[in-house]
Structure formats: C-alpha cells, structure tokens
Image (tube, helix red, strand yellow):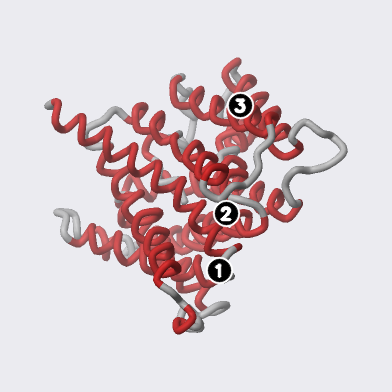
Amino acid sequence: MNTYSRKLGLLLVILGAIFWGIGGTVSQKLFQQFGISVNWLVTIRLLLAGIALLTIQFFKKERSQIIRVWKQKRSSIQLIIFGLLGMLAVQYTYMASISHGNAAVATLLQYLAPVMIIIYTVFRRQAVLTGQDVITVCLALIGSFLLLTNGSISKLSVPMPAIIWGVLSGVALAFYTLYAVPLIKQFGSLVIVGWAMIIGGVALSFIHPPWKIHIATFNFEIVMYLSFVILFGTMLAFWFYIESLQSLEPKETSLLGSLEPLAAVLTTVFWLKVPFGFFQWLGSLCIIGMILLLALVKKPVLKENSSNYDEKAFHN
C-alpha cells in the first residue's frame, strides 16, 4: 500500500465522519428553524441517497449484485426486513430525536447501540462478559446520565420525547448492525444499504408522499441545507467511509469514525448555540471514550454471526 493511498483513505474517513455529524446538526436547523417535516425529510433523504448509492454500484465491476440480491427468496425477504426494521427505523428514530431535542444528544444516544449489542450477545450466550465490556457499559451509563441530567437528578436537561426517540434509535441501530452482517458480506455494502434506503423511503412515502411539500416556500438557504443533508450527510459520507476501507485497516476507520459524535456536539453547541453544561460535556466525553475503547481494543469473535463494527455502514 503506497503512502498516497493511505493519506487518501485517512482523508476520506475523516470527511465521512464529519459529514455524518454535521448532517444531523443541519437536519436540526431544518426541523426547528424552517419547520421541515421529519417524515418528509426522512423519505426524501432515503430515496435520493439510496438511488445515488446504487448508481455508484452500477459503475463498479460488481454491478450484477444490484439485481442478484432479489433473485433469491431468502435474501429478498431479509433485505425487506432490513429496509423496514433496520434502515427506516434507524433513520426515523434518529431524526425524530433531533427534532424534539438536538443533534448532539441524538447522536450520542444512538452510539449506545454497541452497549446494547454487548448486553444482547452476553444474554444470548454468544459472547462472554469481559472487563472491557464492564468498562464500556459503565462509561455509557455514566455518560448518558450526565448528558441527560447535566448532573441534576431532579430534572432532565433534554426533553423526554428526544430521550425516548434517541434510545429507540440506539435499539434500532443495534438490530441494524447485527442483522445486516450476512447480507453485506454476501452482496456488498453499497447494494444492501442502497436498496434498504429505497425500501424504507418507499414505505414511508405511503405515510408522507415526498411530493406533498410546498416547494414554493423553499428559499436558497433551505435548498442548500437539504442538499447538504442528502448529498454530504448521507450519500458521500457513506461512500467515503466504504472507500476508505480499501486503503486503511478496519480498526483505523472505526477509530476515526468516532469523529461523528464529536462533530455533532461541536456544531450543535457552537453553530446552533445550544447550551451545554459542564456535566453534559463530561457525559459526552464518557460516551466518546466508550467509542474509542471499542475501536482500539480487539473484540472477541462471537460464536455465530459476528457483529463486526469495522465493516459497518451503521451511520445516519
């Protein structure tokens, strides 16, 4: 591997993680300042990003995978389940949490998914509880408590609906992570995530058709923010992350991927001027520390389907 490829890989994964984090903050601005509907944004984001990812796959050597996934009954059913209960659930719950609260808290709560996976795999006896797992769970619990209360037991610093949607987002992401592994290994990330986005977008279209929007009320600022969320915060972010795996070790991509919650927190606080107390900062550091611990320390292989975070497309 030459130095140029490695530098390019580092640049791509850093940009991808930052785009993901900022994309959540931009979505918050669209919801809370411009009144954009969560249903509409999730629908249009999934549909356009899914089409874009499959288009990228079409120009690769393995373009036949786009259709081949539908030729097997088993993989077709799994893909539909993943699209509805995985992709759509993750996207909707995450955006709903942002809408009721803010992007920083929503992103950090969603990153509790690895802890939920640890608990699930230990409960199912697919993995043995290790010292690393105990530290990870403790960091997550302490971090979440400080983040949501700012150190005060008597009151929450974040609206309850935002917390509920954020925790549900973590649960959905845990399912997404575990369920996606066999499909992605067989057909590739671009194909599975691209189709899952389209499936989720089409399903949500029955509830909120994407054409039911007053385009005439959109100004240049709204169009720019929407373009960023769809193009940079979804399609390019995912593509860059996957491309970085071609020239970097998986552990490196996972480690640098932790820039996502950091980007979400910083842009929420300094761009949107959302107040963050001392204990919320401390809680955020605990959760980011948990992510770094998971990325740096080798994880035990499960007896059955391994939920390898290093091959993930587990972002927003």
Viewer-proximal residue among 85 and 231: 231
- Check contact, mark 1 vs mark 3: CB within 8 A: no
Crowd band around label 1 with a 10 angstrom C-alpha radius: few (<14), some (14–19), many (20+)? few
Residue type at mark 3? Cys
x, y (%) of residue 52?
Answer: 29, 63
Q: Mark 3 points at which residue?
A: 286
Image quadrant where residue 142 sits: top right
In the rendered image, which residue does mark 2 sit on? 94
Residue at point 42%, 65% (across, down): 226
Which amino acid type is marked by label 1?
Answer: Phe
Q: Pick whichever of labels 2 and 1 is earlier in the sequence.
A: 1
Q: What element carries label 1?
A: loop
Residue visible at 54% across and 30% down in the picture: 288
Judged left or right of residue 191, residue 257 is: right
Exactly how many numbered labels are in the figure? 3
Residue 213 visible in the current orientation: yes
> Foreground: 8 or 89?
8
**Is 69 left or right of 255, judged from the image as shown?**
left
Query: Nearer the observer, disc 2 or disc 1?
Result: 1
**Residue occupying image coordinates x 38% and y 50%:** 183
Residue 46 to residue 163: above or below = below
Q: How far apart are marks 1 and 3 (CA)?
A: 33 Å
Circle 1 residue: 34
Real-space Cα separation, disc 3 to disc 2, in angstroms: 20 Å
Q: Position of residue 260 (x, y in %)?
A: 46, 40
The secondary structure type at the circle numbered 2 is helix
As drawn, 166 above or below 91: above
Q: Residue furthest right?
A: 154
Of marks 1 and 3, which one's residue comes earlier in the chain? 1
